[in-house]
Amino acid sequence: MTLRQIAVSIGIITLAHFVNPIFAQGTPTNAPAGQVQDSGKIIRIIRADRLTLVKVDSVSEKYILAGRVQLMQDNTIFYCDSAVKDESLNTIEAFGNIHINDADSVHTYAQYMKYLGDSKLATLRQKVKLTDGKGVLTTDELQYDINTRIGSYLNGGKVVNGSSVLTSRQGYYYADTREVYFQDKVKLVDPEYTMSTDTLLYDLNRELATFVAMTNINDGRTRIKTRSGYYDMRSGEAEFGKRPIIEDSAQQIVADSIRYDKKKGTGFAKGNVRVKDTAQGITVLSGQAEFDQGSGRMLATAKPVMILKRESDSLFIAADTLLSGSRPRRKQLLNDSISRTDSLTTGTGKPDSVIATNISSRLNGMDSSRNAGLATEVSEDTIKMRKPDQSEALTLSADSSLSETDSIRFFLAYHHVRIFSDSLQGLCDSLSYSAEDSVFRFFKDPILWARDSQITGDTILLFTKNQKPDQLQVLENGFSVSRTPESLFNQIRGNTLFGQFVGGDIDFLRARGSAESLYYLQAEDSSYFGLNYAKADAISLYFINRELKRVTWVSGVEGVTYPFRQIPADKRQLRGFKWQEEKRPTSRYALFAD
């Protein structure tokens, strides 16, 4: 290179204020003869305080610009402190306070930029910021494609949109649609909730988050897990798919899909729904369910089944519709003042004497030794009255397993109600339960089976204690049938029935009001030798190991005993007898089948 060439290559052209009109006309290009460069790809120098032209070789030259530099390509303007423009490669390398104004809609800032004019691709580093006037993307390194108006980062970035802050390892910003596609360790922090996932599509205009991977949302009270769906952050409305989970301190909801309104705390779950009351051990399975987190209410339809979890014998309840809810415990139970008393008293309030029936006078000439055995079995000396039948005072009170600060859980079951547990099964048209008094109420043609006993009536109340059957009351047309191992049926009926459970088995049963009993007599060797029919004001049955062992009658006793081989066919059943074993739920799985 000659001295003259060196002087030209290092020559400095100092630009004053009049430089703008000169460079606004465009700069020379080194396109081959006969070939016209695409005007949309030409990078024009708009202004600079200083400019240096460096001749690299016979066909290549660079412009070195410094001080309030402005360059332009098509509708995109570049600002920086200094830059190097390579004419042959059609590139810019810029330094300091870089600002890219893309059609006056997207603005990008950085401290360093490498820009490829032909592909319109900018690589920016150091304190990078991209904004469309609403959302702000910041990162240490960003690639921005002016053609597609897509910005991407691969080493961590943050988007601030209003009060929401989203961070991720990788991200892709789509300026035309104002959407950001986040990947790898995505986290959204909002004053009302936080969200974490591996992949998230976020619409800055609508503030809409779309999920395509496992996502966790937490607002401090409610936690949501989902693999797909969307969340509208303005309205609080959302839809989740692929077995989402919504849970709080009181319940957990799982389904194939869930529509959810965060502001109202309500939702609709569909497909293999499971709602679990984590505090009180109640689970509901159904085809679909509506829920309200504020009131704790849930309406389940499409073959719902409720499971009341117990240590060894959970209770399953199926119906056409299940309604469940909760409310704060009342300071005083509504029924505290109502005491259901079934005491055996006369008009003076004193107990009547228990009549030990003289069986021998009723056996019509049967063997005296057998008579003596039965008389001993039911004599007054051998009858030890147990609680509660000395007073049978029954006060409605809350389950002792609940504390004073617990919320009260209640549920209602409508139409075709079926229940199953290992120790208790039942049918009715409708059912209600409240943890406040721990009473199941069975309405309209209810039937209960406990081991080999069947109980029917107009209405049945089942009192529980520590979530186990404790006492039973049948209101109107009470009828109890107890089947023996030999398929004989001991029967008792009355206007009302009262029973006591021990270990899940009926231990005591009393009928009052037009009471009648029919039971088979056994000798000491357990062989049957007769059938006794009796009616009285009140009749009590006592069971040991699920077998009838004693019977007592009170006031107005009448009856007859038939020898076993001489029992008339029409005397084997009391009026209204029905043994309905074919209706009895045989397993928990039978509740799900139909």
Image (spheres, helix red, strand yellow):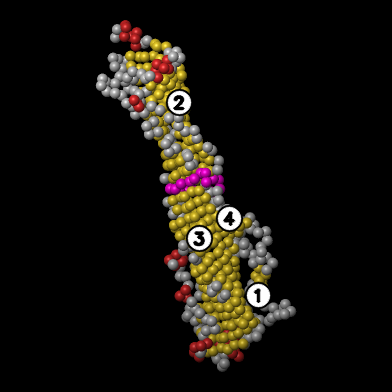
State yes or no: discs 3 and 4 in contact (Cβ < 8 Å): no
Cα–Cα gap, marks 2 and 4: 54 Å
- Circle on res. 300: 3
| Residue at 62% from the left image edge and 56% from the top image edge | 328
Residue at the far left in the pictured view? 34
- Secondary element at image label 1: loop
Residue placed most toward the observer, 492 or 56? 56
Residue 128 shown in magenta: no
What is the secondary structure assignment of the residue under circle 2?
strand
Image quadrant occupied by the N terminus = top left
Q: Earlier in the sequence, mark 3 or mark 2?
A: 2
Q: In the displayed structure, would residue 262 be above or below residue 70?
A: below
- Which residue, as the protein is rendered here, is positioned at the far bottom? 365
Q: Which residues are magenta?
A: 218-235
Quarter location, residue 363: bottom right
Q: Nearer the viewer, mark 1 or mark 2?
A: 2
**Residue pointed to by mark 4:** 295
Q: Amino acid at mark 2?
A: His
Instruction: Let me know if residue 244 appears in the view.
Output: yes
Q: Which mark is residue 69?
A: none
Residue 346, located in which quarter of the rendered image? bottom right
